Image (cartoon, helix red, strand yellow):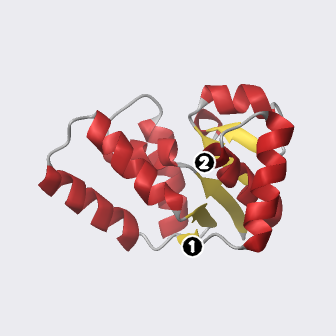
Amino acid sequence: MEQVVIDSSVLAKVFFEEKYTENALKLKDAYINESLDVTAPSLIFYELMNIMLSKKAQPSEMEAITESAYDYGFEIKEADELLAAITIDTATTYGLTAYDAAYVALARINSSILYTADQKLLDKVNDKKIARHIKEF
Protein backbone atom coordinates (compact mmCIF):
# COMPACT_ATOMS: atom_id res chain seq x y z
CA MET A 1 0.00 0.00 0.00
CA GLU A 2 1.27 3.46 -0.86
CA GLN A 3 2.30 5.61 2.08
CA VAL A 4 2.22 9.41 2.08
CA VAL A 5 3.02 12.17 4.54
CA ILE A 6 0.66 15.11 4.96
CA ASP A 7 1.23 18.46 6.58
CA SER A 8 -1.12 20.76 8.43
CA SER A 9 -2.02 22.70 5.28
CA VAL A 10 -3.60 19.53 3.90
CA LEU A 11 -5.22 18.45 7.16
CA ALA A 12 -6.80 21.90 7.58
CA LYS A 13 -8.45 21.56 4.17
CA VAL A 14 -10.29 18.49 5.44
CA PHE A 15 -12.06 20.70 8.00
CA PHE A 16 -12.24 24.11 6.29
CA GLU A 17 -13.61 24.75 2.81
CA GLU A 18 -10.66 26.18 0.91
CA LYS A 19 -9.04 25.88 -2.46
CA TYR A 20 -8.04 22.21 -2.97
CA THR A 21 -10.32 20.95 -0.19
CA GLU A 22 -11.68 18.43 -2.69
CA ASN A 23 -8.18 16.99 -3.14
CA ALA A 24 -7.58 16.78 0.61
CA LEU A 25 -10.89 14.99 1.07
CA LYS A 26 -9.98 12.59 -1.73
CA LEU A 27 -6.73 11.76 0.10
CA LYS A 28 -8.59 11.31 3.40
CA ASP A 29 -11.12 9.01 1.68
CA ALA A 30 -8.31 6.92 0.17
CA TYR A 31 -6.95 6.49 3.69
CA ILE A 32 -10.36 5.59 5.13
CA ASN A 33 -10.90 3.10 2.29
CA GLU A 34 -7.52 1.55 3.18
CA SER A 35 -5.93 2.20 -0.19
CA LEU A 36 -3.41 4.65 1.29
CA ASP A 37 -1.38 4.92 4.50
CA VAL A 38 -1.07 8.44 5.90
CA THR A 39 1.56 9.56 8.38
CA ALA A 40 2.67 12.85 9.87
CA PRO A 41 4.98 14.13 12.58
CA SER A 42 3.22 14.85 15.87
CA LEU A 43 3.62 18.59 15.40
CA ILE A 44 0.78 18.45 12.84
CA PHE A 45 -1.78 18.85 15.62
CA TYR A 46 -0.14 21.99 17.02
CA GLU A 47 0.13 23.47 13.56
CA LEU A 48 -3.54 22.64 12.92
CA MET A 49 -4.39 24.49 16.14
CA ASN A 50 -2.43 27.53 14.92
CA ILE A 51 -4.36 27.45 11.64
CA MET A 52 -7.64 27.32 13.57
CA LEU A 53 -6.52 30.26 15.73
CA SER A 54 -5.71 32.26 12.60
CA LYS A 55 -9.21 31.47 11.31
CA LYS A 56 -10.65 32.73 14.61
CA ALA A 57 -12.30 29.39 15.33
CA GLN A 58 -14.13 29.16 18.64
CA PRO A 59 -12.54 26.98 21.36
CA SER A 60 -15.36 24.42 21.13
CA GLU A 61 -14.90 24.16 17.35
CA MET A 62 -11.14 23.82 17.81
CA GLU A 63 -11.61 21.01 20.32
CA ALA A 64 -14.05 19.18 18.03
CA ILE A 65 -11.76 19.49 14.99
CA THR A 66 -8.71 18.40 16.97
CA GLU A 67 -10.60 15.38 18.29
CA SER A 68 -11.76 14.49 14.78
CA ALA A 69 -8.20 14.82 13.46
CA TYR A 70 -6.95 12.42 16.15
CA ASP A 71 -9.84 10.04 15.46
CA TYR A 72 -8.77 9.56 11.83
CA GLY A 73 -5.97 7.43 13.21
CA PHE A 74 -3.23 8.59 10.88
CA GLU A 75 0.14 7.20 11.90
CA ILE A 76 1.75 9.89 14.04
CA LYS A 77 5.52 9.93 14.31
CA GLU A 78 7.02 11.33 17.49
CA ALA A 79 10.41 12.98 17.32
CA ASP A 80 13.36 10.66 17.78
CA GLU A 81 17.08 10.82 17.01
CA LEU A 82 16.69 9.72 13.39
CA LEU A 83 13.87 12.14 12.61
CA ALA A 84 15.77 14.95 14.33
CA ALA A 85 18.96 14.24 12.36
CA ILE A 86 17.16 14.06 9.01
CA THR A 87 15.15 17.17 9.89
CA ILE A 88 18.36 19.11 10.53
CA ASP A 89 19.84 17.87 7.26
CA THR A 90 16.63 18.72 5.39
CA ALA A 91 16.33 22.19 6.94
CA THR A 92 19.91 23.09 6.06
CA THR A 93 19.81 21.51 2.60
CA TYR A 94 16.60 23.20 1.47
CA GLY A 95 16.54 26.34 3.64
CA LEU A 96 13.37 25.29 5.47
CA THR A 97 12.18 25.92 8.99
CA ALA A 98 12.57 22.94 11.30
CA TYR A 99 8.78 22.64 11.31
CA ASP A 100 8.51 22.32 7.53
CA ALA A 101 11.65 20.20 7.37
CA ALA A 102 10.14 17.66 9.80
CA TYR A 103 7.43 16.79 7.24
CA VAL A 104 9.94 16.52 4.40
CA ALA A 105 12.31 14.52 6.59
CA LEU A 106 9.57 12.04 7.46
CA ALA A 107 8.80 11.59 3.77
CA ARG A 108 12.51 11.00 3.13
CA ILE A 109 12.74 8.45 5.96
CA ASN A 110 9.64 6.62 4.72
CA SER A 111 10.62 6.86 1.03
CA SER A 112 7.24 8.44 0.45
CA ILE A 113 5.76 11.68 -0.86
CA LEU A 114 4.79 14.69 1.23
CA TYR A 115 1.53 16.30 0.13
CA THR A 116 1.23 19.96 1.02
CA ALA A 117 -0.49 23.17 -0.05
CA ASP A 118 2.55 25.21 1.02
CA GLN A 119 3.90 26.60 -2.24
CA LYS A 120 6.94 28.20 -0.55
CA LEU A 121 7.98 24.79 0.78
CA LEU A 122 7.47 23.23 -2.65
CA ASP A 123 9.53 25.97 -4.31
CA LYS A 124 12.41 25.35 -1.92
CA VAL A 125 12.35 21.55 -2.19
CA ASN A 126 11.58 21.54 -5.93
CA ASP A 127 11.56 17.74 -6.18
CA LYS A 128 8.30 15.91 -6.92
CA LYS A 129 9.87 12.66 -5.72
CA ILE A 130 9.82 14.20 -2.22
CA ALA A 131 7.01 16.77 -2.11
CA ARG A 132 3.93 17.50 -4.22
CA HIS A 133 1.09 19.96 -4.10
CA ILE A 134 -2.18 18.52 -2.82
CA LYS A 135 -3.80 19.57 -6.12
CA GLU A 136 -1.84 16.69 -7.70
CA PHE A 137 -3.57 14.08 -5.59
User: Does residue 112 show up?
Assistant: no
* The C terminus, quarter of image: top right
State the residue in front, 101 or 3: 101
Where on the picture, by quarter, is residue 96?
Answer: top right
Q: Residue at x 34, y 50 (%)?
A: 49
Other-residue count near label 1 (Cα within 10 Å), few / some / many at <14 / 14–19 / ≥20: some
User: Does residue 133 show up?
Assistant: yes
* The N terminus, quarter of image: bottom right
State the residue in front, 27 or 41: 41
Label 1 or label 2, whichever comes before in sequence order: 1
* Residue 2 spot, x, y in % from top left: 72, 64
| SS at circle 1 | strand
Q: Residue at x 62, y 27 (%)?
A: 119
Q: Nearer the viewer, mark 1 or mark 2?
A: 2
- Residue picked out by circle 1: 75
State the residue in front, 106 or 33: 106
Other-residue count near label 2 (Cα within 10 Å), few / some / many at <14 / 14–19 / ≥20: some
| SS at circle 2 | helix
* Residue 15 spot, x, y in % from top left: 32, 48
* Identity, as a three-letter code, of the amino acid under mark 1: Glu
- Residue picked out by circle 2: 99
Left or right: 52 with respect to 134? left
Q: Residue at x 49, y 56 (%)?
A: 44
Where on the picture, by quarter, is residue 71?
Answer: bottom left
Using the image, determine if residue 60 lies above or below residue 126: below
Left or right: 73 with respect to 132? left
* Residue 6 spot, x, y in % from top left: 59, 53
Residue at mark 1 to residue at mark 2: CA–CA distance: 18 Å
Q: Residue at x 65, y 57 (%)?
A: 5
The label on residue 16 is none
* Identity, as a three-letter code, of the amino acid under mark 2: Tyr
